[in-house]
Image (spheres, rainbow, N blue to C red):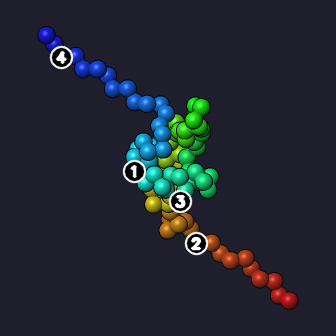
Amino acid sequence: MPNHTQPTVEAAFMNVQNAARYMGISVNTLYVWRHRRQGPPSFRMGPGGRVMYRRDLLDVWLTEQQNADSRSNPALNPVRKAPQRSPARRAA
């Protein structure tokens, strides 16, 4: 008999613990970001109001963070920018 493997189903929604593990950060960091409204978008789901994260929005947020960093986005590298001249001073 052939060995049929079941396809892996990845959850579309993650709780705080799984989202933190997915992002490679601590649960505490994710809670602090949520409290400060700095981290990825989250919402409360269900009667207990569990904090949840959508996997697709985590990926979008992580990409935005990467693109905003000059070390991973060459367009933002300050060394590559042309020097700017200071405005000419007017005589008093």
Which residue is painted at 47% across and 37% down in the image? 14
Work out whether mark 2 precedes mark 4 in sequence or the reverse, and give the earlier one.
Answer: 4
Label located before the other in sequence (3 or 1): 1
Residue at mark 2: 83
According to the image, label 3 marks what residue? Answer: 76
- Badge 3: residue crowd in 10 Å (few <14, some 14–19, many ≥20): some
Residue 65 versus residue 25: which sits nearer the camera?
25
Residue denoted by label 4: 3
Q: Residue at x 55, y 46 (%)?
A: 40
Q: Say how many tags the image has.
A: 4
Which marked residue is nearer to the observer: mark 4 or mark 3? 4
Distance Cα–Cα, label 3 vs label 1? 25 Å
Residue beneath disc 1:
24
Name the amino acid, label 1.
Gly
Q: Say which label, 1 or 4, has the lower sequence index.
A: 4
Furthest residue toward right: 92
Q: Distance between the residues labelled 1 and 4?
A: 34 Å
Q: Distance between the residues labelled 2 and 4?
A: 64 Å
Residue 85 is tagged as none
Q: How far apart are marks 3 and 2 (CA)?
A: 14 Å
Counting from the top left corner in percent of width and height, residue 38 is at 59, 54
Amino acid type for the residue under numbered disc 2: Pro
Q: How crowded is mark 2: few (under 14 residues within 10 Å), some or many (20 or more)?
A: few
Pair 2/4: label in front = 4
Q: Quadrant of the C terminus?
A: bottom right
In the displayed orientation, state which residue is furthest to the front: 48
**Disc 3 versus disc 2: nearer the observer:** 3
